[in-house]
Amino acid sequence: MQNSNSPPKAAPLTAMYCWKVLLRPLRIPHREYLSRVVRFASDYLSCSSSSPRAAYPSGNLSFGSLKVRPKSEPCRTLGMKKFPQRHRLVQGDLLHECPVVRWSDDPQSEQQQGHDLQQLLVGEAVDCIVMSQACDLEHTVTFGTLYCVRRIDSPSTNRFGNERWNQANRIRPRKTGLGFWMM
Amino acid sequence: MISANDPTDGHTLVAETSLIDFHEILSPPRIFLETWTMHTALPRLRLLPPYREHLSQAFARYFMRVGLPSNIKKVW
């Protein structure tokens, strides 16, 4: 039995592994969801910079917003720490271009009637942050890890973030000021 | 710009200043996330306390909000 404090073992995303470990214990809707996620993740991991993903609406493999720079260059350190990828997930982890599957953002629900709902699922590579409580991740079996998308703005905005707040409020005018957290 | 230094390799991991949008919440299976993070070759940044708790409180404040049909006017 695996110790809860030890990091999870790496396992290849083979078809047999996906069926035995990921898909089989789940109910049918979850199985369909995870099947699409695994298919997208396999495509994500197999492509290279010379063959970017063209079938998905966002994301690329250039990692333009996440890069390694020499230590001497000045930066703002907002309570951040760098962790290797083998460390367990905890609250506050930033996941760069994580492959997810979700419903398309078509707001006109009447046009969705009669359509195959599976066709409304889209695969995306998004930047996320883990929001599940650390105690839940450590001591309980959590099926879903809750996290939010973080939007990366252009570097031309000023350092105090006023333009970011204004831009965010223009996007979501009815929820001014409450639904965002800047870092 | 946010950054974090790793003393073992002497490099700093850098990311652009970002906004966390509480309107978009995803809940993928945890085992998938752990498997995916094991397969990615990049290290990741982690928000440390007390900023982590500040973010968590902001998310809870947004999630537990009560919408009134009309705003309460200040009469005093």
Image (cartoon, rainbow, N blue to C red):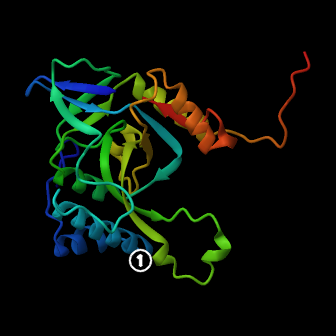
Residue A170: x and y in percent read 62, 40
Q: In which quarter of the image is residue B42?
A: top left
Which chain does the numbered disc 1 sit on?
A: A
Residue placed furthest toward the right:
B75
Whether residue A25 is visible, yes or no, is: no
- The answer to whether B43 is drawn above or below residue A16 in the figure is above
The spot of residue A107 in percent (x, y) is 62, 63
Give the farthest residue toward the front. Answer: A156
Q: Is mark 1 on a helix, strand or loop?
A: helix
Q: Count the numbered circles shown.
A: 1
Query: At 32% from the left edge and 72% from the top edge, which residue is drawn?
Result: A35
Name the residue at 32% across, 38% down.
A93
Q: Where is residue A116 in the image (x, y as percent from the top left)?
A: 52, 82
Q: Which residue is drawn at 44% across and 21% down?
A: A159
Find residue B1 and report its image quarter. top left
Relative horizontal placement of residue A149, taking residue A69 as reference (left or right):
right
Q: Which residue lies furthest to the top in this view?
A: B76
Which corner quadrant holds the C terminus of chain A?
top left
The picture places residue A61, in percent across and down from the top left corner, at: 23, 53
Q: Mark 1 points at which residue?
A: A28
Given residues A169 and A132, the one toward you in this image is: A169
- Amino acid type indicated by mark 1: Ile
Nearer the observer, B38 or A41: A41
Q: Farthest residue in the bottom direction?
A: A114
